[in-house]
Image (cartoon, coloured by chain):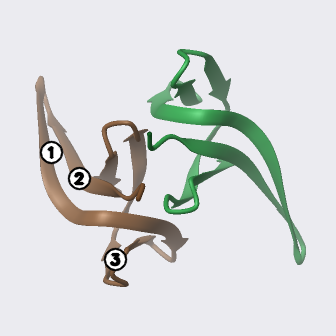
Chain colours: A brown, B green
Amino acid sequence: MCEATAFLLKEKLEEKEESLIMNSVDKIEPEQGGIRLVNIFGEQKFIKGYIHSLSLVDHKIFLKLT
Amino acid sequence: MCEATAFLLKEKLEEKEESLIMNSVDKIEPEQGGIRLVNIFGEQKFIKGYIHSLSLVDHKIFLKLT
């Protein structure tokens, strides 16, 4: 399976902080005011943010708040 | 491996058009004015756009132009 882990990315000055949002993410779709994440178990999460970057071989998705 | 295929998404009225941008995408990073795609072979492509949505179990990334 090719699902990935979604992290919220916060950059403060020189520091980068990654906090876990959701495991086993399958789909991310835009929705009014943000994005909706759906994992392979059908669980959903809404985030007021956007997809910042991807590193798929590492199974990582980075999101940022708007 | 968990790379995906990147498609450019164009929506005109009720029609959806997907055109292939790059196969075997590993990383997508924001860059001034757009995003840079890098595939597992190290090939790169710059797109004046953003990541619209993901469907990772289908190995698909959808981009839109800005």
| Quadrant in the picture for residue A43 | bottom left
Residue B52 versus residue B37 in the image, above or below: below
Residue picked out by circle 1: A18
Q: Which mark is residue A46?
A: 3
Residue displayed at 37% across by 74% down: A40
Counting from the top left corner in percent of width and height, residue B58 is at: 58, 61
Instruction: Say which amino acid is labelled 2.
Output: Phe
Residue A3 versus residue A37 in the image, above or below: above
Q: Is residue A29 left or right of residue A16?
A: right
Q: Point out the tag, 1 or 2, that comes first from the N-terminus.
A: 2
Q: Chain of mark 1?
A: A
Q: Point out the tag, 1 or 3, that comes first from the N-terminus.
A: 1
Residue displayed at 74% across by 37% down: B21
Residue picked out by circle 2: A7
Q: Secondary structure at mark 1?
A: strand
Residue displayed at 48% across by 33% down: B26
Residue B17 versus residue A47 in the image, above or below: above
Q: Chain of mark 3?
A: A
Instruction: Say which amino acid is labelled 1.
Output: Glu
Visible residue check, residue B33: yes
Q: Chain of mark 2?
A: A
